[in-house]
Image (cartoon, rainbow, N blue to C red):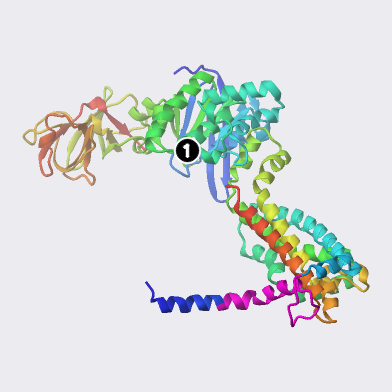
């Protein structure tokens, strides 16, 4: 992470209600200068409302928004040094690509040769030099998106807001644009705040992610922290695929927890902190599919977190193999992911008996 | 495939329908070029009646009046109708509101004419060209509003926010973004309003007051026709037909054109 420690945007206790719905609920958040920040969450979690409050299109009912330490809550959107790339791109249909990009600078009073130079630079930055005279409707989706980017970046805003920037692109283009956005953020040194519902997108691009749930931050951290150390079942479930085991905390000592799961017996997890966990209380153990090791061995083999089950389904994804394993007493099958080149791949057929296990430090204990 | 005889019968039927619709108009156009003053016999091609039309002071002054009424009422109706369309578009959808706005479009002209006359009399407004202008503006607002709203349906509202986000004021956004984008719709609405005003008779007749000073073109023709249909009237009618046709065509072109 290249981000400095300096705070660029501070959201202080912002709340926004629409009738009976609380879209943003006493939310506080710092965005650092020069970072690529992602607001992630399911639809209706308040991420778009938060973005629109930062842009100035919505006013918080309670709370403040600060930019460089200055309160901008009451500043109108056309007076904020913040620009936005809209989900629909919102290109002006009656203006050429060149005039679309020039618009923001014209509003600042930039004219003549200075204007032309900066628009040409912006066109070059998004590799659209040849397309300046075209109207937006003659461009492809990817080209339109680059026009929208250039138009929002040309004013060199303190903060660039991107509302679902890749949602309208097909999958292959999306991958390219993820890298392109990273490159632009790096080259321009402008802080990017992206709103997305796509966790893969957030993981791939962001320095830090705030995962939102019902107007509150469920967890804030690096992509790795959210994936590997989810703070709650919601986070664990939203980011990637996760296996859950409901049970009771049977013992807790030396950073190691033992969980009693009905029908399966004891499972182990290594934990850093389990404040508020009472022995005997309900907990959830979580393990990622790629951490589960499979072997075709005699059932009932001993070892930590070793379970015997039956293959109930196999999905071939090319590079990987997704295996669903039925376990006694568990409502949902255990999901395991392994390379399709694995030496046991051919043995994993429906009905086959398998042994699964994972090291205790690959599982997490979740209290909520 | 249909049987050949069946197809021929259908084609014949279509021809008859068109003849019924356009026959009278065709006869009118042809007779306007007839040398003879009588509609019973064709005596040769002539532009005489068009010449007479252009020398008739009563017709010329009524055309002048109509152009004044149509231009001014179109200007009023287009400004108010466009703003109305933009305003309604921002509100929550409401069938009642839509209904109220579009009532002047479907209400019978005679009812509107009586209502407007009573209204002007009640307020002691002297009648004349100005009262016709206001009356035409009333129903034309509804038509302009309807046309502009069609345009707004394909209008991505986020471009307004994008303009503000890029530093433009609300007024500048209207002038540089909103108005240019909906302009084909505004122009189409204006042309429609103009056409409707040019050949509107009943409301103008009721709200013009006494005296020939505020006689509009359709009223003049009505006055002339009481002495019988002359080829001069045919010439006038053909002229109006061509003019209206051109305007409507232009209006449709504009509202279709330019991809949103």
- Say if the magenta span includes residue B68: no
Residue in the picture at 66% in, 53% down: B185
Q: How many numbered marks, from 0 up?
A: 1
- Disc 1 is placed on an element classified as helix
State the image quarter where residue A101 is shown.
top right
Residue A244 versus residue B21 in the image, above or below: above
Q: Residue placed farthest to the left in the image? A: A298
- At 72% from the left and 38% from the top, the residue drawn is B172
For this view, does A69 lie left or right of residue A182?
right
Picture coordinates of residue B33 (x, y %)? 75, 71
Report the front residue among A357 and B254. Answer: B254
Q: Is residue A10 visible?
A: no
Q: Which residues are magenta?
A: B16-45
Percent position of residue A314, x then y:
18, 41
Give the quadrant of residue A229.
top left
Q: Answer left or right for A173 relative to B133.
A: left
Chain hosting mark 1: A
- Tell whether B6 sits left or right of A294: right
Instruction: Indicate whether residue B31 is drawn in magenta.
Output: yes
Q: For residue A110, what is the image quadrant? A: top right
Can residue A76 be seen in the rendering of this structure?
Answer: yes
> Which residue is farthest front?
B44
Instruction: Identify the residue shown where x is 44% and y is 18%.
Output: A1
Report the front residue among A174 and B12. B12
Residue A119 in the image, given as x and y percentages of width and height: 61, 25
- Residue B102, percent from left and from top: 68, 65
**The N terminus of chain B sits in image quarter:** bottom left
Residue matched to label 1: A141
Instruction: Decide if residue B28 is on the left or right side of residue A20.
Output: right
Mark 1 Cα-neighbour bin, 10 Å: few <14, some 14–19, many ≥20: some
């Amino acid at each position: 992470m290249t981000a400095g420690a300096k705070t660029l945007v501070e959201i202080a206790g912002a709340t926004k209600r629409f009738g009976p719905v609380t879209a943003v609920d006493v939310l506080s958040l710092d965005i650092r200068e020069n970072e690529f920040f992602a607001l992630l969450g399911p639809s209706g979690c308040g991420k778009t409302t938060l973005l629109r409050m930062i842009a100035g299109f919505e006013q918080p009912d309670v709370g403040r928004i600060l930019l460089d330490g200055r309160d901008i809550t009451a500043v109108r959107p056309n007076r904020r040094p913040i620009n936005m790339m809209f989900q629909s791109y919102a290109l002006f249909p009656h203006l050429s690509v060149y005039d679309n990009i020039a618009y923001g600078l014209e509003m600042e009073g930039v004219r003549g040769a200075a204007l032309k130079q900066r628009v040409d630079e912006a066109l070059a930055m998004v590799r659209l030099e040849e397309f300046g005279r075209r109207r937006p409707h003659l461009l492809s989706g990817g080209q339109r998106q680059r026009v929208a980017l250039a138009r929002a970046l040309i004013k060199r805003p303190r903060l660039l807001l991107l509302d679902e920037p890749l949602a309208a692109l097909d999958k292959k283009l999306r991958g390219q644009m993820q890298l392109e956005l990273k490159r632009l953020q790096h080259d321009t040194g402008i802080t990017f705040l992206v709103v997305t519902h796509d966790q893969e997108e957030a993981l791939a691009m962001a320095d830090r992610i705030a995962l939102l749930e019902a107007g509150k931050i469920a967890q804030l951290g690096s992509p790795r922290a959210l994936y590997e150390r989810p703070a709650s079942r919601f986070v664990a479930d939203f980011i990637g695929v996760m296996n859950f085991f409901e049970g009771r905390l049977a013992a807790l000592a030396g950073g190691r927890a033992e969980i009693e799961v009905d029908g399966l017996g004891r499972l182990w997890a290594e934990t850093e902190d389990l404040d508020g966990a009472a022995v005997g209380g309900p907990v959830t153990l979580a393990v990622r599919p790629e951490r589960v090791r499979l072997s075709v061995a005699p059932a009932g083999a001993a070892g930590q977190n070793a379970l015997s089950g039956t293959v109930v389904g196999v999905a071939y994804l090319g590079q990987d193999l997704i295996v669903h394993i039925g376990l006694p007493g568990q409502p949902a099958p255990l999901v395991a992911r392994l390379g399709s080149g694995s030496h046991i791949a051919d043995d994993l057929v429906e009905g086959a008996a398998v042994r699964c296990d994972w090291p205790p430090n690959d599982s997490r204990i979740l209290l909520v | 495939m249909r049987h050949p005889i069946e197809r021929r019968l259908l084609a014949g039927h279509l021809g008859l329908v068109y003849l019924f619709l356009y026959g009278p108009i065709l006869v009118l156009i042809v007779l306007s070029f007839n040398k003879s003053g009588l509609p019973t016999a064709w005596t040769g091609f002539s532009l005489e009646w068009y010449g007479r039309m252009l020398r008739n002071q009563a017709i010329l002054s009524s055309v002048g009046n109509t152009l004044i009424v149509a231009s001014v009422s179109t200007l009023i109706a287009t400004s108010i109708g466009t703003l109305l369309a933009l305003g309604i578009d921002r509100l929550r959808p409401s069938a009642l509101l839509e209904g109220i706005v579009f009532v002047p479009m479907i209400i019978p002209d005679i009812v509107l004419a009586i209502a407007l006359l009573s209204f002007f009399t009640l307020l002691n407004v002297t009648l004349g060209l100005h009262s016709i202008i206001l009356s035409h503006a009333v129903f034309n607002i509804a038509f302009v509003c309807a046309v502009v709203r069609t345009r707004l349906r394909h209008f991505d509202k986020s471009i307004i926010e994008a303009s503000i986000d890029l530093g433009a004021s609300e007024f500048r956004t209207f002038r540089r973004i909103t108005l240019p984008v909906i302009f084909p719709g505004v122009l189409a609405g204006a042309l429609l309003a103009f056409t409707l005003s040019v050949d509107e008779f009943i409301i103008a007749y009721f709200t013009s007051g006494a005296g020939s000073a505020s006689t509009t073109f359709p009223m003049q023709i009505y006055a002339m026709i009481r002495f019988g249909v002359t080829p001069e009237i045919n010439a006038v009618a053909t002229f109006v037909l061509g003019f209206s046709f051109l305007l409507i065509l232009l209006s449709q072109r504009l509202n279709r054109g330019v991809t949103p």
